[in-house]
Image: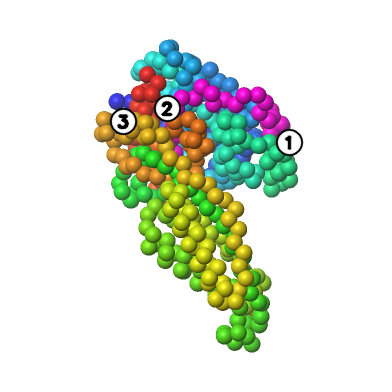
Amino acid sequence: MIQSEPQTIDELMDWISGISDAEGPGTTRLLYSQSWIKAQQALKEKFEELGMKTEFDAVGNLFATIEGTEQPEEIIATGSHVDTVAKGGRLDGQLGIMAGYMAVKELLETEGKPKKSLQIISMAEEEGSRFPYVFWGSKNIFGIADSKDVEEIADAKGVKFTDAMREAGFDFLQGEPRHNRIAAFLELHIEQGNFLENTGKKVGVVNAIVGQKRYTVTLKGQANHAGTTLMEYRKDTVECMARIVVQSIDKAKAEGNPLVLTFGRVEPKPNTVNVVPGETLFSMDCRHTDADALDRFTKEIEADMRAMAEGMGIEIEIDNWMNEKPVPMDAHIIDTIESVCKDNGLSYQVMHSGAGHDSQIFAPRVPTGMIFVPSIDGISHNPAEHTEAVDIQQGVQALAEALKRLAY
């Protein structure tokens, strides 16, 4: 049975979390910042201590590899992203990298060199915390990142993406991307929700990442005096939004799991106490593991919103600006992880991911699987983000045993 001591897990996470752009609480490690450079270099040294060959690609993804003894051309990879949100927790992203380190370290110590190559990938970026672009690391591994999308963008301080990248010592990808030898990819991550905690399970075997549709909806009515405009003469866009929200959420609850619907951003205008709001902008986020169900439900909601607005004499504009399809994980990898959990007596649950991850970029292109560990109170992207070391231990054990079956 392959295991990592809880004390070692906490020490490793404290070490990597301490590499931050800002004082705590929390870790701030934004793409191409000084702490990002320091973290990638520190990880490079730690991987090399295991005898792994390390190299960066053009944009700053770090690859650490142990060559296989029989089929070195086939790579069994694991890892996650090294960047964080501002004032983030100690686990998101970097736990997947350190779990890969712990798993590979113990496999080398107990099993020797693998037949297929083993690789840990510390991906440059996933969060979009510094620049308005996500999955820069994993997209470049597959050559699907468009340089035109980042050439003109800048961070909140006005620093251009291209300037930050080149100052950190990197540049745009030239030539072939790096995925050609990856035969399988596994990512360990905190759940970022409370399903595992509520069910008492310690390992999540992810079977799919949800599809997402995001909207910006604008309602236009008539701004008017809050005291002199009688109720029957109002074209109140906040009232219209409120009716839409209640009706839509009632429908979502009736639809049942795994569909989720969120109205998270509201901007009424003129947004003052004594004026009937003549315009209101709000967001809508809908997610489901089934593409057809997601499309059907959101089309119903769009029709309901239009009908509600029309009935109240209010104009409506619906902008569906994100439409990401659900991404299933590979059936063989799912079976491998589940079999590992059964054979080792691990407390596990097959489940879906309600959040996006680097694995959704990998999964359509190489056989991919994900392992979740519980998040206490479902908290993530927050200094309070925490998972007990004994729970992480079960996740690392599942990862190590799965890598063993795939590479040895």
Q: Is residue 143 left or right of residue 47?
A: right
Between 279 and 79, the one nearer to me in the picture: 279
**Alpha carbon separation for disc pair 3 and 1:** 45 Å
| Magenta residues (range) | 162-189
Locate the N terminus and report the quarter of the image it occupies: top left
Residue 168 within the segment the image draws in magenta: yes
Q: Residue at x 67, y 72 (%)?
A: 270
> Which residue was labeled with disc 3?
340
Mark nearer the N terminus (2 vs 1): 2
Q: Is residue 148 above or below residue 380?
A: above
Above or below for 380 versus 282 = above
Q: Amino acid at mark 3?
A: Val
* Nearer to the camera, 245 or 14: 245
The residue pinned by badge 1 equals 163
Q: CA distance from mark 3 to mark 2?
A: 17 Å
- Element type where label 2 sits in the image: helix
Q: Which residue in the protein does label 2 denote?
A: 102
**Circles 3 and 2 in contact, beta carbons < 8 Å:** no
Residue occupying the point 59% across, 61% down: 318
Crowd around label 1: few <14 · some 14–19 · many ≥20 (10 Å): some
Q: Is residue 81 magenta?
A: no
> Residue 209 occupies which quadrant of the picture?
top left
Compare marks 3 and 2 and give the one earlier in the sequence: 2
